[in-house]
Image: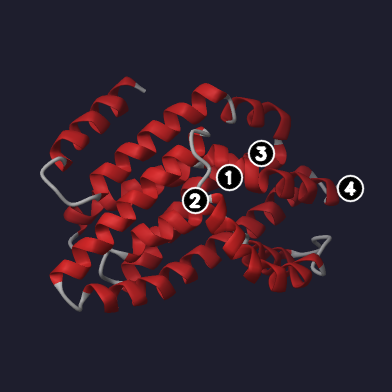
Amino acid sequence: MELTHAMPVYLTALSIGLLGSAHCIGMCGGITSALSLSLQGKSRWQTAVLMLAYHLGRIGSYTLAGFILGSLGWYLGDLSREVHMALRGFAGIMLIAMGLYISGWWRGLMRLEQLGGRLWKHIQPAASRLLPIRNLPNALALGSLWGWLPCGMVYSTLVWSATQGNALQSALLMCLFGLGTLPAVFLTGLFARQLTSLIQAAATRNIAGVLMILFGFWAIPGPHQKWVMSLLAMGSHSM
């Protein structure tokens, strides 16, 4: 995929991560705050470095998951054009569901998180044994395990990234998605009280949810995509 054509998709992956930050803080904010407390006694610089390593491990897990599911998506999408279009439509529906979930208007994605919880039961004991964080390898390993924490937003983005027709492209999109979540979640670990109230405000969540729903409609193939893009452009200029 040429860079000029891929750029909107890359920006979308980053934007999904940024817009989903309110949900990320709800899911991971308690974890990152607890990690920060476990690092008491270390300097602010040491805490920041270890927390960053933890989040890089988490993003690495998203990237790996993107590659795995992207390989499956590439195989299924290569079967026929109809299958590929159906996958893209399903991915758009998942993003719309994520927008409804972030805003709190519909909680259907919690069922997906419950299914992911079955895998998490086998991973959580290993992750817990890595606490407290002691060094960089320890922080990276802990993050790579916590990256598999059941999360409807991650699942929705995974499905969307898997429809891109290339495993490496899917992995890159999941990496960019993870980087999009990084600012809010990372800073929450350092300034939890100040940022959590702002990002989790009802107005913030509603705006993020509406934009996510628009992304979902844009992802569904059809002539409506130009109209959605014009709305997203208007929203970006007004923010």
Residue behind mark 3: 188
Residue 148 seen in the figure? no
**Mark 4 or mark 1, earlier in chain:** 1
Q: Which is nearer the N-term, disc 4 or disc 2?
A: 4
> Where residue 187 appears, x then y in whole percent?
63, 39
Q: Which amino acid does label 3 sit on?
A: Thr
Of the numbered discs 3 and 4, the one sitting upstream in the chain is 4
Q: Mark 1 points at which residue?
A: 24
User: Mark 2: which secondary structure?
Assistant: helix
Could you say which is closer to the camera, residue 120 or residue 22?
Answer: 120
Q: In this view, does 130 lie to the left or right of 111?
A: right
* Residue 234 position in % (x across, y down): 24, 25
Quarter containing the C terminus: top left
Q: Distance between the residues labelled 4 and 1?
A: 27 Å
The residue indicated by pointer 2 is: 153
Q: Identify the mark at residue 130; answer none if there is no mark.
A: none
Is residue 198 visible in the rendered image? The answer is: yes
Q: Using the rendered view, name the quadrant where residue 143 is placed.
A: bottom right
Mark 4 and mark 2: Cα distance apart in space: 34 Å
> Image quadrant for the N terminus?
bottom left
Rendered residue at 76%/43% (across/down): 44
